[in-house]
Amino acid sequence: MRMNVAKENAALAALEFVKDGMVLGLGSGSTAEIFIEQLGEKVAGGLRVQGIPTSDRTAECAKEAGVPLIAADKIRSIDLTIDGADEVDPAFSLIKGGGACLLREKIIAHASAKMVVIIDASKMVENLGAFPLPIEVDPFGLTLTADKIYEALKDTGCREAQTVLRQAKDGSGPLVTDGGHWILDSKCEHIASPFETAKALSSIPGVMEHGLFIDLADTIIIGEVDHAKVMELAKN
């Protein structure tokens, strides 16, 4: 219950960044869905926005909430993306992809003028890596790709590099993303240099995208039981 209240407070604080007429990237996950529900109430009250969902589940949630949607191919830029995260470090680097939506989430975040991340306090960490790093891969040549991922993780100083293929919850086999790919979860424990690890993973042909979001988040909103803390990235 306390966790849900914290998520609701983070989502409410994020609504303050939404302005009339905006094109919004709508993130995936439980906290993002709370935001979408609250956004729907604002839309019902007259707020005009268009949302671009980062997953099929998010699209369903937005339709249920009455949030108008627009296809990503119909726009040239996105004003603001509101999304959650699995881990956030002090430099605002993120691990995302626990919900297997990382490829679409990163496409939308990268195209956005601003990204606001809504989390509860448990997601703030000193170093990324305790949460297994999701890596979206093409099923073709999976073993070859997994070997390259292992080498990249070890070469960039990750404490561990055990990688497992994520399975569907219904036991039917590998989880298939909305884009038709598979997910490898790498149990790094500690990612010494998120930038170098991200660069190394991006160079592997079989990797469609990885869950390290570097230099994308501008604002982190941490929900608490009785308030929300808004943190802005310091500009050099």
Image (cartoon, rainbow, N blue to C red):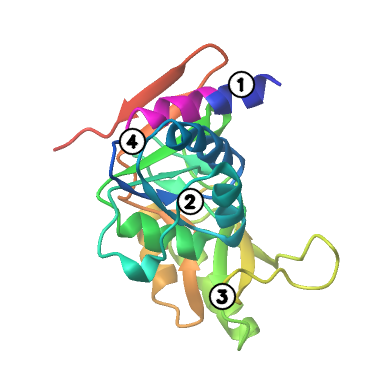
Residue denoted by label 4: 18
Which residue ends up furthest to the left in the rendered image?
236
Check disc 3 and give the amino acid type: Val
Q: Are marks 2 and 3 in contact (CB under 8 Å)?
A: no
In this rendering, would 162 be left or right of 70?
Answer: right
The N terminus, quarter of image: top right
The span from disc 4 to disc 2 (Cα, nearest Å) is 33 Å
Check disc 1 and give the amino acid type: Val
The C terminus, quarter of image: top left
The span from disc 4 to disc 3 (Cα, nearest Å) is 34 Å
- Please give the range of residues in magenta: 9-18
Check disc 4 and give the amino acid type: Val
Expressed as whole percent of the image width and height from the top left, the position of residue 29 reads 59, 46
Which residue ends up furthest to the bottom in the rendered image?
141
The span from disc 2 to disc 3 (Cα, nearest Å) is 20 Å
Badge 2 marks a residue whose secondary structure is loop
Using a 10 Å C-alpha cutoff, classify the residue at mark 3 as few (fewer than 14 neighbours), some (14 to 19) or many (20 or more): many
Q: Earlier in the sequence, mark 3 or mark 1?
A: 1
Q: Residue at x 36, y 60 (%)?
A: 196
Residue denoted by label 1: 5
Residue denoted by label 3: 137
Q: Are marks 4 and 2 in contact (CB under 8 Å)?
A: no
In this rendering, would 46 be left or right of 186?
Answer: left
Foreground mark, 1 or 4? 4
Residue denoted by label 2: 191
Check disc 2 and give the amino acid type: Ile
The span from disc 1 to disc 2 (Cα, nearest Å) is 31 Å
> In this view of the protein, which residue sits in the foreground, 26 or 2?
26
Expressed as whole percent of the image width and height from the top left, the position of residue 80 reads 32, 46
Which residue ends up furthest to the right in the rendered image?
171
